[in-house]
Amino acid sequence: MARRQLPGQPHPIVSYYRVGRLLHGSLLLFLLESWVYWIMFENALSTGIPLWTVFWGSFFLFSFIHIFLVIMDGWSRYQDYKKAKDLFFSYGFQPRIASQFIGSKCQRSAAIEASRELGMNEVVKEYYRDQGVKWFHYIPYFMVQDPFFMIRKAFWKRTFLEKHYVPKYDFHKMQLQTTA
């Protein structure tokens, strides 16, 4: 394989942050929300009114559980990013590769970040636009198409339990070799 000139490669932590910007923002909101709901729950416990205790306890549990779901979703999207980067590097832009990551805003962000780091993000963004993806398409398409998505094994596996992906290429090392 001929060596390609790679754009500057960010540190993996920077890539992880960029891939999951929305998820990291959600994480901060759920942390803040959980803290507020915990205070309200403690106040409800001190009043001894069961209705308020159940009400604020339910809100707290909802927010608290989402902290872990968002962290796991961020992990899964980072695995998508690594896979997309390897595929785009190996085969260049291919619609069949980009279409693997079209399902949700977070998956598209992973593919766009991977392609940006390879210098081909405009073609990936254009492909998504041509497929009818709009900037405000935050809700994953499968949620709209299948109202029972939460009981599907594929949803849990793909969204929160993505297997660790070991990259085939060391892009930092390759960048150093091409600039040397």
Image: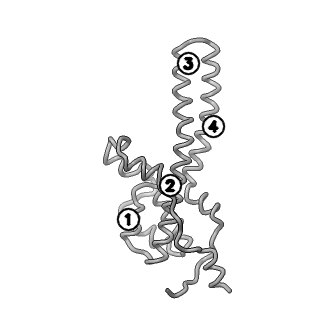
Residue at image mark 1:
99
Mark pair 3, 4: CA separation: 19 Å
Amino acid residing under circle 2: Ser
Task: Say whether disc 3 or disc 4 marks the residue closer to the N-terminus.
Answer: 4
Other-residue count near label 1 (Cα within 10 Å), few / some / many at <14 / 14–19 / ≥20: some
- Report the residue marked by disc 2: 76
Up-down relation of residue 144 to residue 15 (above or below): above
Under circle 3, the secondary element is helix
- Label whose residue precedes the other's in the sequence (2 or 4): 4
In this view, the residue in front, 34 or 161, is 161
Element carrying mark 4: helix
| Cα separation between marks 1 and 2 | 17 Å
State which mark lies toward you, 3 or 4: 3
Q: Name the residue carrying label 4.
A: 32
Instruction: Look at 56% across and 47% down and name the residue there.
Output: 71
Indicate the amino acid at tag 1: Ser
